[in-house]
Image (cartoon, rainbow, N blue to C red):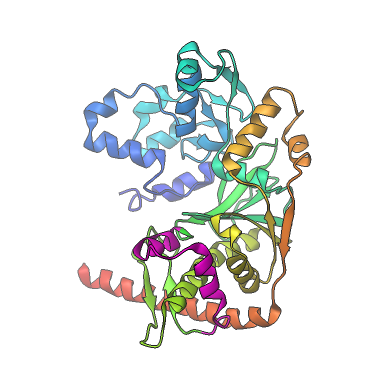
Amino acid sequence: RWQKEAVPQKLYPLTRQTLWTGHPVSLLRWVKENEPQRYAQIGCVMMTHDYLRWCLTGVKGCEESNISESNLYNMVTGQYDPLLTEWLGISEIDSALPPVVDSAEICGEITAQAAAITGLAVGTPVVGGLFDVVSTALCAGIEDESTLNAVMGTWAVTSGIAHGLRDHEAHPYVYGRYVNDGQYIVHEASPTSSGNLEWFTAQWGDLSFDEINQAVASLPKAGSDLFFLPFLYGSNAGLEMTCGFYGMQALHTRAHLLQAIYEGVVFSHMTHLNRMRERFTDVCTLRVTGGPAHSDVWMQMLADVSGLRIELPQVEETGCFGAALAARVGTGVYHDFREAQRDLRHPVRTLLPDMAAHALYQRKYRQYQDLITALQGYHARIKEHAL
């Protein structure tokens, strides 16, 4: 319905968000239409980490870096906007939106009840916290527009830090508030990353990740005509697109399937990386975090396909690490997040592209894009005949 009413197009100039089924506003509209009694009882709308903070402190609030990507927040004014909920048909929840708090703002203290459950000391200050992609960019050391952060997990995310909003861009980039004044996180994302490999390994439980890497490394780079579309959980090529292998023949082994999965995930990341490089034109380095960053085989493939210098910050659990940095800023250990980021001391490993392999992968990547285009045409015809 929202698509037919062009609601996403109306929202974007104000929220700088796309609209998808997992957004808070989508869930709220669903509850309103399907469980009206529950909807009528809503007392407060919070993101997950805001709810956890309320459980710890008894104080309600929505942390800015997270709520700014909810479609409830006007990116231009830096506030909630009743016009947004009116367009979305959920104006009733305006009064249920709690105050917006900063990432490093002390929002309350650990209560006696929370202390008894968690073991934390009563009175410990609790700060706002961070949206996960913001935390990852912070911990990856992203400071300017020459470096992007790729997060490889269930989602394929490519993020950059911008110094302002832009109008009339080539793509509907998702913006969010960043931890430094005047800066925004900009990202492109889809659920098309290493979650696909996790599904595959669940079907063959006898495979270790070392064995997978060895299998992929045993084959010539870009040497197969086998393709994998990493769309098990969603797509960045259209709502109708689904997962699958293409080009499989009797000669292919399990190693070929694994190589195709690695390649398909990288090719899908390239969709977002290429779009982001239209926005961040000075990029020469990609900093990568997430599970696949532990695989030199996969990371070298990413370097070879992209032609970029790949840097691998040796830091684990960037969500928790970033939250700890927010706490240190909030309690005065650091003056601000810039100082906290400058004090990061984790080592960074570097991989450089093999330009001979880059030429081979570019050919295969173009074939992947052609396959996507052909399938989009197929789905368009199916939809047309179904009308």
Q: Quadrant of residue 273?
A: bottom right
- Nearer to the camera, 310 or 163: 310
- Bounds of the magenta segment: 195-223
- Nearer to the camera, 158 or 24: 158
Residue at image position (38%, 58%) is 233
- Nearer to the camera, 325 or 338: 325
Q: Position of residue 243 (x, y in %)?
A: 37, 67
Q: Position of residue 86 (x, y in %)?
A: 38, 34
Res. 283 visible in picture: no
Q: Position of residue 117 (x, y in %)?
A: 45, 20
Residue at image position (64%, 80%) is 357
- Specify whether residue 14 is painted magenta: no
Q: Position of residue 268 (x, y in %)?
A: 50, 66
Looking at the image, residue 190 lies above or below residue 61: below
Residue at image position (22%, 27%) is 37
- Nearer to the camera, 118 or 192: 118
- Looking at the image, residue 131 sits to the left or right of residue 20; the answer is right
Residue at image position (50%, 46%) is 17
Res. 101 visible in picture: yes
Looking at the image, residue 254 lies above or below residue 134: below
SS majority, magenta: helix
